[in-house]
Image (tube, grey):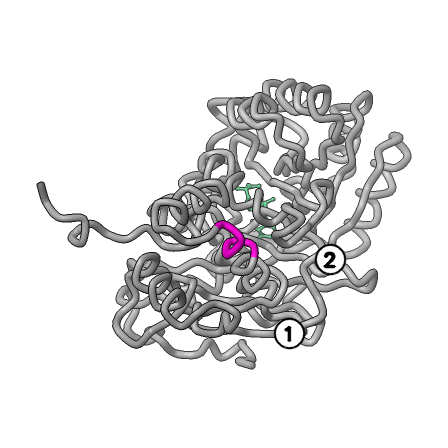
Amino acid sequence: MISVELEKKKPFLDYTKTELAVRFKEMGIPSYRLGQIRRWIFARKTGSFSEMTDLSKDLRACLRESFSDLPEGKDSIFSGEIITTSGSPDGTQKILLELADGNRVESVLLRDDRNHRTGCISTQVGCAMGCAFCASGMDGFIRNLTRGEILEQILRINSLLPPEERLTHLVIMGTGEPTLNLEPLLSALEDATAQDGLDIGNRKITISTVGLPEGIRKMAAANVPYKLAVSLHAPNDEIRDRIIPQNRRTGIAKILEASDFYFHSSGRRTTFEYILIDDLNSRPEHARQLASLLKNRTAIVNIIPYNPVPEFSFKTPSSAVVHRFVEILEEGGIQVKVRFRKGDGINAACGQLRRSFRKNSDPDLSGKEDPDQKIL
Ligand code: SAH
């Protein structure tokens, strides 16, 4: 038998609370210690074992030894490292996290005037969906994130807030297709919602999908208590096929059937996200088609003016076009919200920060600050 030491250690945040309880028992650590440790991590935003001063020095050393593969002298509950933090005047902050294997993911903190503090979290490195307007998928799919890596993003974003503040909302709208990495995501969200975790309400968490009917049904089958957002972005299959390659396989009708199913099983009304791209999907007839598609559904449409990605030639429509589109939807009895861009100047569209900090592929950009960014 190869000795246990040679195996890679499972990082601390990869364990669920229940798994940790079992592990602590095996290690002879009293169970109340788990409560102390969780208080340090979730309430006090502590990032290292050495700061947990109500644990004995021996226990702190033992935890560091047992749950982390970090080099000697490094003490962290996290396995990744923040490469850069950028902020924009509207209070949006974005981090680029380098994972243990060198891959990078981005996460965002958004604030609004209702005092919502929302974390936008990634679920995959890269994305396989290949949507024509999205920077995240440009380099394809690399791998799924682990439970610990998803939770690490949530905790890191929570730590950007002042000590007395906590995240109030989460949107799973960073890089990746969450329904293709559902189990680790749901496991991480258990800690986000637990009373002795971050205690974020179920209704304050939204999972956004490109619209995979099987994925949506899987969420319903797992009794997921969170809100569902579907990236519809088009009023008919002809347009949707052009901008979302997955649609050629699924079609809009099946996606709507699956989201109706989710609504009936969860009681949560679906949000349909609709990026307005000039001319492509933003004409009055598109608004009328969209209104008739959603007419008898308990749904809300989230209009998002396209956030320009330099590599693509799509254009953001004028505010008059946005206004007219919204008006037609409302006349059709549809509830609409317009989500304005946040984080201008910090590459806040999905995948942009990661791309501007690519390591090897473009030596000019390696490790260098993006000129548009303000590094805090
Ligand atoms: N894969 C999931 C979640 C990640 S993308 C999904 O497709 O929903 C999160 C949201 O940002 C999606 O609605 C996506 O379509 C949108 N998005 C991607 N690129 C964008 C851009 N350039 N401008 C505006 N929204 C964009």
Horizontal and vertical percent position of residue 63? 37, 61
Q: What element carries label 1?
A: loop
For residue 34: magenta? Answer: yes
In this picture, residue 60 sits left or right of residue 150:
left
Viewer-side label of 1, 2: 1
In this picture, residue 98 sits left or right of residue 186:
left
Sort mark 1 into few (<14), some (14-19) or many (20+) by Cα contacts within 10 Å: some
Horizontal and vertical percent position of residue 5? 18, 54
Instruction: Name the residue rendered at 82%, 64% in the picture.
Output: 113
Q: Mark 2 points at which residue?
A: 340
Q: Is residue 95 above or below residue 150?
A: below
**Magenta span main SS:** helix
Horizontal and vertical percent position of residue 77? 43, 63
Q: Is mark 2 within 8 Å of ligand 1?
A: no
Q: Is residue 93 visible?
A: yes
Q: In this view, does 291 lie above or below 7?
A: above
Question: Would you identify the image quadrant in which residue 325 lies?
Answer: top right
Instruction: Name the residue rendered at 18%, 48% in the picture.
Output: 4
Q: In this view, does 94 lie above or below 184?
A: below
Residue toward you, 109 or 212: 109
Q: Distance between the residues labelled 1 and 2?
A: 14 Å
Q: Give the range drawn in magenta.
A: 31-35
Q: Name the residue under label 1.
A: 88
Question: Would you identify the image quadrant in which residue 45 lies?
Answer: bottom right
Give the numbered dot on residue 52.
Answer: none
